[in-house]
Image (cartoon, rainbow, N blue to C red):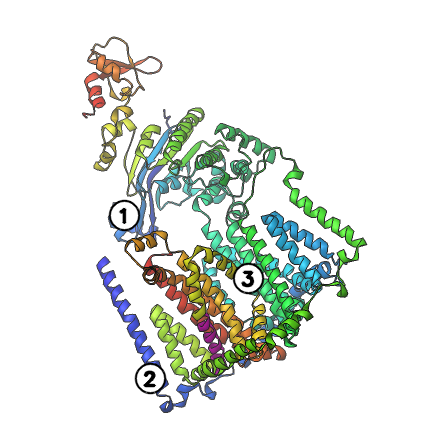
């Protein structure tokens, strides 16, 4: 039996690249023979493009009005609105029940500092408290609190919804099988496709922003919940059963506490995704940091944009570090007979500080709120500095040359080349790549995904999207991979760079546009540049981690075999790190697909631009069709790369 | 040692893993070997096992990894549903119990100790030990009091507010033992309780275990892969291989008369004089004239070594604790065991 297994395995291993090569050759042939090709192979003819957007619109209208979903969602939005009003009142004094707010900024900052201390000591206290002090002093308290008031509702709701869905997925395998592909699509849908339905089904304003945020932030919580519950050690489960636990007791006292780490990692991701999305809800007119940033960037006020960027980054880092500290925080015991006030010391200090500042703020105006003329904003000055730097001949010379070079010699030719390719040839190439990694099924999947994109009639726009993604990721790989490899060589370098990458990954994608616009102005190069920085981060991070994860023993074995550093890198470290690096590459591509859509407001000509237009016209059907084009392309890449990575891992015997 | 009705009795118990184990067992019959079953695409974790455990008895199930010993003990507590046969615990067919009754049985009668301790990481020692009591709804004060009693019993006093990760492996297993004893179970399952500990601690824990066992007098099923541990602790040993029981007998008899070649491989290197007791060697007196002082029935041959060498009598009388004569031991036979020439 074993022998037949082996041979059939070998036959398949040879057969796969063979078929893949034939497919690829066919694709090349079609491209070369383009002038002679019949019209329908070059582009899907107009008559074959069916009005999917109209049909989808009809379907949505049917669900919305005839099935009455709108009433359900309006009820939900009433509930959400009530919650949002409470946080809005408390944080920035919106005139709604319970009419208590706004809480003085000093009290909020003090509570943040004490929370930071409770989670990880003095440095965290400084970071958390300092963030809020900065926000207040720089005069952005109100807009920052508008943003925070939505996160304060969206993150808990998303975490709870994710927990329940994750529980269901863990309990019912059939539900899990149905849910997982849906989540994959959700994670690749462009954010505009979250925003428009939210606006249509839930009232414009904070409610829609909150709903879009919740939906966007739920998937990782579902995955982490299901993962965590599956990982609970079987002996702990058996110990629960042998203690005579009922099903509810098992869940409440055994499963959920034992899965604490994974659940809290899920919560961390929920918080970070919430922040990223809340900033983007500026596109549907949600007030807050995002909206301010958007309007400042539109009017090219780079200094103030920079300040807001710093605020967003500080808030992101604080939320990320605090929630990660919560993940690793272990309970510590108190000796028997410790009085209750000692056990709850930090909590008491927190309450005391909160009340103390509440009282102080009644008498001291600056402790309550910072007035417009009291803030320390130096946006105008920074503006001046940036202008001075940018008017420096040497710098403008470099950026302008780069811009000219990239546009004329790289981007435009590449874009035109991609656009010139016959549709059939691109679809075949995708299928070839699929066949190479995963055989017939993957070939069908990748081919079909691109085929569907072609049939929607949005081919050219999709190709322009793809062009921006590919050029930026290739640039990122050209720079990120060597840097990552260099950094991984020395522990001294690797750790700080990893820290920088980790931190940079928590930044909401929006802020990456600030330096791009500063340097290159508003054009294709800054789009590619923004994607490029955004995508370099995961590439570097996974390269370093992949190389560092190579077991020390193997390196020693290579040393003892007399390998030079170069040989060691090429023959030992890189081959073993490749599966991990592929994961980074995949993440870079997913990030790029996300970013390219955001860049729409710079004035791209791709799917993002069309998507942005649907927002104005409430064209839900078209929005959905465009969104699916982006998702299908992203999913093809995701499938092919992850499949390849998994294959390599299996072949290497590492998991 | 055992009274009439066994506490646990397994009759022709089968546990198969695979696509349709019930269907396969029904169609293929019960005479299949482990290999035949494996070829059919099933794993026979437990294969036609019949075992009884008497009240107050300690049965040790010994086997190498993959022999099905852990599965068998889980069949007894119905952590795993069996494929065929029946398991009777205290007169109840455990497979016939509904969820409620099963929970009740575990809350009143069973305790279990696990190889990797199975402690709940978010609870203190006290709360871990009180966990089974909490599950059955005992009030907070009562359960803490009882938990403290057991914590003292296993020698962890002063550590009750610690979290499991703050304790050493041996201490963690003491918590596991305390938890399993909190409800005062009649039946005590121990699944390789000392395998995860290093040798010195293991020895210490075995002594501790023997002490507890002497105090509590429970019916015990103890799993181990360590033959020496089995010999040291057991009333009876069941040796398992490929899901089936190869031999089930007292340590003395297993050492003296291994039933199969497989068992013999384990007994080969054992120093038999440490295991064999005088009472096993005692033959009926049948009118042989025996005189002089008697040797104790539960002394091992090794403990009698000096006397055996110096003795001149051919037959030595053997007497139990109360001084009653139970038979006579052939000195030559005992010397053969002592010198390892059996």
Which of the image's four quarters has the C terminus of chain A?
A: bottom left
Instruction: Confirm whether the magenta stretch covers residue A463.
Output: yes
Label 1: element kind: loop
The residue indicated by pointer 3 is A506
Mark toward the viewer: 2 or 1: 2
Label 3: element kind: helix
Compared to residue B341, the image places residue B296 above or below, namely above
The residue closer to the viewer here, B93 or A543, is A543
The residue indicated by pointer 1 is B29
Label 2: element kind: helix
Q: Earlier in the sequence, mark 3 or mark 2?
A: 2
Give the distance between the C-alpha atoms of the residues marked 3 and 1, in whole angstroms.
61 Å
Q: Is residue B47 left or right of residue A163?
A: left
Which corner quadrant of the image does residue A410 belong to?
bottom left
Using the rendered image, report if marks 2 and 1 lie on a common chain. no
Q: Is residue A572 left or right of residue A474?
A: left
- Give the chain letter at badge 1: B
Q: In the image as oriented, which residue stretches furthest toward the bottom?
A: A36
Considering the whole magenta stretch, tell me its main secondary structure.
helix
Compared to residue A274, the image places residue A596 above or below, namely below
* Residue count near mark 2 (Cα–Cα under 10 Å), binned few <14, some 14–19, many ≥20: few
What label sits on residue A29 in the rendered view? 2
Give the distance between the C-alpha atoms of the residues marked 3 and 2, in whole angstroms.
45 Å
- x then y, percent, for residue B67: 31, 42
Q: Is residue A178 left or right of residue A152?
A: left
Give the distance between the C-alpha atoms of the residues marked 2 and 1, in whole angstroms.
62 Å
Magenta residues (range)? A457-476
């Amino acid at each position: 039996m074993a022998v037949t297994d082996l041979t059939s395995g070998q036959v398949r291993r040879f057969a796969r690249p063979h078929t893949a090569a034939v497919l690829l050759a066919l694709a090349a042939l079609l491209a070369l023979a383009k002038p002679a090709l019949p019209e329908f192979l070059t582009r899907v003819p107009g008559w074959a493009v069916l009005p999917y957007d109209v049909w989808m619109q009809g379907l949505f209208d049917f669900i919305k009005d005839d099935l009455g979903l709108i009433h359900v969602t309006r009820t939900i939005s009433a509930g959400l609105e009530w919650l949002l009003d409470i946080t809005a009142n408390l944080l920035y004094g919106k005139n709604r029940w319970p009419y208590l707010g706004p809480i003085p900024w000093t009290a909020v900052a003090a509570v943040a500092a004490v929370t930071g201390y409770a989670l990880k000591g003095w440095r965290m206290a400084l970071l958390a408290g300092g963030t809020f002090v900065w926000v207040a002093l720089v005069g952005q308290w109100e807009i920052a609190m508008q943003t925070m008031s939505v996160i304060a509702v969206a993150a808990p709701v998303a975490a709870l919804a994710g927990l329940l869905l994750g529980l269901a997925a863990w309990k019912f395998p059939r539900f899990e099988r149905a849910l997982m592909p849906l989540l994959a699509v959700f994670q690749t849908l462009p954010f505009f496709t979250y925003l428009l339905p939210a606006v249509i089904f839930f009232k414009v304003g904070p409610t829609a922003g909150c709903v879009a945020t919740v939906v966007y932030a739920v998937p990782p919580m579902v995955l982490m919940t299901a993962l965590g519950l599956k990982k609970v050690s079987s002996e702990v489960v058996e110990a629960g059963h042998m203690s005579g636990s009922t099903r509810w007791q098992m869940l409440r006292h055994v499963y959920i506490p034992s899965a604490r780490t994974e659940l809290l990692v899920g919560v961390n991701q929920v918080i970070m995704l919430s922040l990223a999305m809340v900033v983007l809800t500026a596109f549907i007119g949600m007030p807050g940091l995002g909206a301010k940033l958007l309007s400042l960037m539109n009017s090219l006020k780079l200094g103030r944009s920079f300040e807001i960027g710093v605020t967003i980054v500080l808030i992101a880092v604080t939320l990320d570090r605090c929630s990660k500290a919560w993940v690793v925080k272990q309970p510590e015991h108190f000796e028997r007979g410790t009085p209750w006030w000692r056990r709850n010391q930090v909590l008491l200090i927190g309450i005391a500080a909160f009340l103390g500042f509440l009282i102080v703020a009644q008498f001291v105006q600056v402790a309550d709120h910072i007035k417009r003329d009291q803030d320390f904003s130096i946006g105008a000055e920074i503006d001046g500095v940036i202008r001075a730097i940018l008017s420096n001949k040497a710098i403008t010379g470099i950026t302008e040359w780069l811009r000219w070079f990239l546009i004329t010699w790289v981007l435009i030719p590449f874009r035109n080349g991609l656009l010139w390719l016959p549709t059939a040839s691109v679809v075949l190439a995708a299928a070839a790549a699929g066949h190479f990694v995963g055989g017939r099924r993957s070939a069908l999947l990748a081919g079909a995904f691109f085929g569907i994109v072609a049939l929607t009639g949005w081919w050219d726009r999709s190709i322009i999207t793809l062009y921006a993604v590919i050029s930026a990721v290739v640039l990122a790989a050209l720079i990120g991979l060597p840097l990552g490899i260099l950094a991984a060589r020395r522990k001294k370098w690797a750790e700080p760079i990893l820290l920088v990458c980790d931190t940079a990954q928590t930044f909401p994608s929006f802020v990456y546009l600030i330096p791009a616009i500063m340097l290159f102005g508003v054009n294709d190069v800054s789009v590619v540049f923004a994607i490029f920085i955004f995508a370099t981060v995961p590439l570097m991070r996974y390269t370093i981690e992949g190389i560092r994860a190579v077991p020390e023993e193997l390196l020693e074995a290579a040393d003892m075999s007399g390998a030079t550093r170069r040989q060691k890198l090429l023959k030992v470290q890189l081959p073993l790190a490749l599966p991990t690096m592929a994961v980074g590459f995949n993440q870079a591509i997913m990030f790029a697909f996300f970013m390219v859509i955001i860049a729409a407001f710079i004035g791209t000509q791709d799917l993002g631009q069309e998507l942005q237009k649907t927002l104005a016209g409430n064209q839900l059907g078209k929005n959905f069709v465009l969104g699916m084009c982006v998702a299908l392309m992203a999913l093809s890449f995701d499938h092919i790369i992850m499949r390849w990575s998994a294959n390599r891992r299996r072949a290497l015997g590492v998991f | 040692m055992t009274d009439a009705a066994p506490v646990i009795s397994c009759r022709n118990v089968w546990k198969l893993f695979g696509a349709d184990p019930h269907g396969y067992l029904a169609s293929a019959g019960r005479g299949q070997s482990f290999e035949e079953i494996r070829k059919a695409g099933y794993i026979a974790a437990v294969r036609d096992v019949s075992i009884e455990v008497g009240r107050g008895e300690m049965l040790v199930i010994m086997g190498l990894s993959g022999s099905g010993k852990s599965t068998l003990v889980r069949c007894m507590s119905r952590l795993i549903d069996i494929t065929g046969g029946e398991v009777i615990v205290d007169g109840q067919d455990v497979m016939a119990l509904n969820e409620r009754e099963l929970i009740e049985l575990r809350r009143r009668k069973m305790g279990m100790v696990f190889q990797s301790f199975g402690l709940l990481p978010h609870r203190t020692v006290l709360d871990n030990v009180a966990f089974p009591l909490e599950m059955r709804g005992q009030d907070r004060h009562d359960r803490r009091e009882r938990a403290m009693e057991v914590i003292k019993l296993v020698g962890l006093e002063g550590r009750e507010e610690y979290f499991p990760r703050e304790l050493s492996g041996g201490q963690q297993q003491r918590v596991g033992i305390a938890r399993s004893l909190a409800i005062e179970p009649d039946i005590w399952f121990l699944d390789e309780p000392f395998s995860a500990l290093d040798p010195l601690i293991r020895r210490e824990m075995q002594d501790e275990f023997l002490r507890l066992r002497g105090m509590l007098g429970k019916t015990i099923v103890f799993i181990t892969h360590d033959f020496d541990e089995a010999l040291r602790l057991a009333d009876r040993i069941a040796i398992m291989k490929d899901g089936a029981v190869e031999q089930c007998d007292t340590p003395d008899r297993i050492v003296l008369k291994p039933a199969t070649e497989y068992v013999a491989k384990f007994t080969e290197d054992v120093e038999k004089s440490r295991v064999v007791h005088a009472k096993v060697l005692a033959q009926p007196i049948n009118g042989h004239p025996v005189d002089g002082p008697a040797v104790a029935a539960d002394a091992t041959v090794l403990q009698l070594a000096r006397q055996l060498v110096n003795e001149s009598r051919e037959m030595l009388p053997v007497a139990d604790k109360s001084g009653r004569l139970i038979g006579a031991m052939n000195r030559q036979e005992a010397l053969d065991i002592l010198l390892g020439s059996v």
